[in-house]
Image: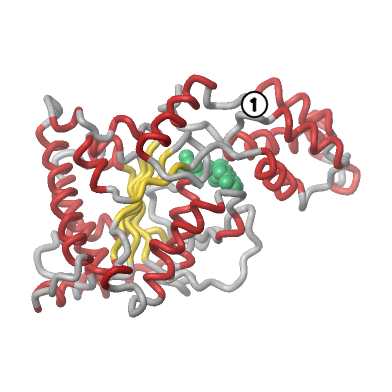
Amino acid sequence: AISQRNGDSVPRRKPTPITRRETPPSSEQETSDHRTIDSDAEDEDEENSDVAKIMEKLPKGIDPQSAKQILNDIVVRGDEVHWDDIAGLEGAKKALKEAVVYPFLRPDLFSGLREPARGMLLFGPPGTGKTMLARAVATESKSTFFSISASSLTSKWHGESEKLVRALFGLAKALAPSIIFVDEIDSLLSARSSGSEHEASRRSKTEFLVQWSDLQRAAAGREQTSREKKEGDASRVLVLAATNLPWDIDEAARRRFVRRQYIPLPEQHVREQQLRKLISHQHHELSDADIQVLVQVTEGFSGSDITALAKDAAMGPLRNLGEALLHTPMDQIRAIIFQDFEASLYSIRPSVSPDGLRKYEEWAKEFGERG
Ligand code: ADP
């Protein structure tokens, strides 16, 4: 089912306290320039004191309990993705640079007619790099990154979610420049939640739209009142939202996203680029011809399916060893070969069906931008 998250084994963004500098497997990390609250904190004590400092200066009107929850669970720290980690999606990268990264780095150039949009919707099949793109935007624009899943907002924080939304936007302004990334936005802005759905999720939807409108007003060049200025820089907060179910977003909410970027399945050359990168640091014996075959047979795979395939194939040499694995020296482990991929292709299948894909293409044609 297309609504289902792909069961890849790559750690997804998780709303647990992120206390350690995590390095994505695909990136050899250069020095960090991701603007984080605790960019150099190595231990929890330091981080706690960062949180404490922010809590001390908390703007009025933000519920302290919600703020703490956001600082602990929703602000992502030290979890960097750079443009080069993401295979393909050149059009989307370009659009995001123009819409977010450059304006955040050079706000003086982007005013008046060049005022950037306050929100962008990334839509497409699951596992195509939407979350990675949002993370890269935060890294490259040196922004504080707030990452929240809309479905957890309405389920986990039920009843509290309205307060949480208010605190989320409040903190984003206080710690601007900020990116608020809302995954599974459909569950917050669906046509259904305005109908017979639970009162609490309707209220959090309304609160989200109200808070977002405030940002949009700030972007439209309206003078901020001195109270608003004290609360932070609303003009440097952007909502990035992702969905696998764009058709579930109600029409009014959809129109608020001036920019709607289609994140499609990877094309042939992108699959090749990704495959080559995944095996580049591995001991393998795949020839160029082997790679060409793999590129052909992975038509319809998402980026996440390809990662899952490569990870499974990489297990091949170990699987063959059985128990001997426990005492075989590293240099005697055989290389990954084409047959490992062949075997993995039996179990790792594309997570989007051709029918499902057609639905995205149609929605993109009607409502989206490509690239
Ligand atoms: P989405 O948010 O679209 O569901 P993610 O960005 O979470 O997808 O991607 C899931 C995983 O799949 C990533 O962690 C990465 O390993 C892999 N992946 C997906 N798309 C790409 C891509 N374009 N380039 C490199 N890896 C990708």
- Regarding residue 45, the answer to whether it shows in the image is no
Residue 180: x, y in percent? 32, 56
Residue at disc 1, secondary structure:
loop
Q: Residue at x 52, y 26 (%)?
A: 352
Q: Residue at x 11, y 41 (%)?
A: 203
Residue 317: x, y in percent? 82, 35
Position of residue 192 in the picture relative to residue 105 (left or right): left
Position of residue 329 in the picture relative to residue 194 (left or right): right
Can you say which quadrant of the picture contains the N terminus?
Answer: top left
Out of 133 and 29, give the one closest to the viewer.
133
Pointer 1 local density, CA inside 10 Å: few below 14, some 14–19, many at least 20: some
**Ligand 1 quadrant?**
top right
Q: Picture quarter containing residue 101?
A: bottom left
As displayed, is residue 161 above or below residue 69? Answer: above
- Regarding residue 97, the answer to whether it shows in the image is yes
As displayed, is residue 137 above or below residue 31? Answer: above
Q: Which residue is mark 1?
A: 348
Q: Residue at x 19, y 40 (%)?
A: 252
Residue 122: x, y in percent? 40, 45
Q: Which amino acid type is marked by label 1?
A: Ile
Position of residue 354 in the picture relative to residue 338 (left or right): left
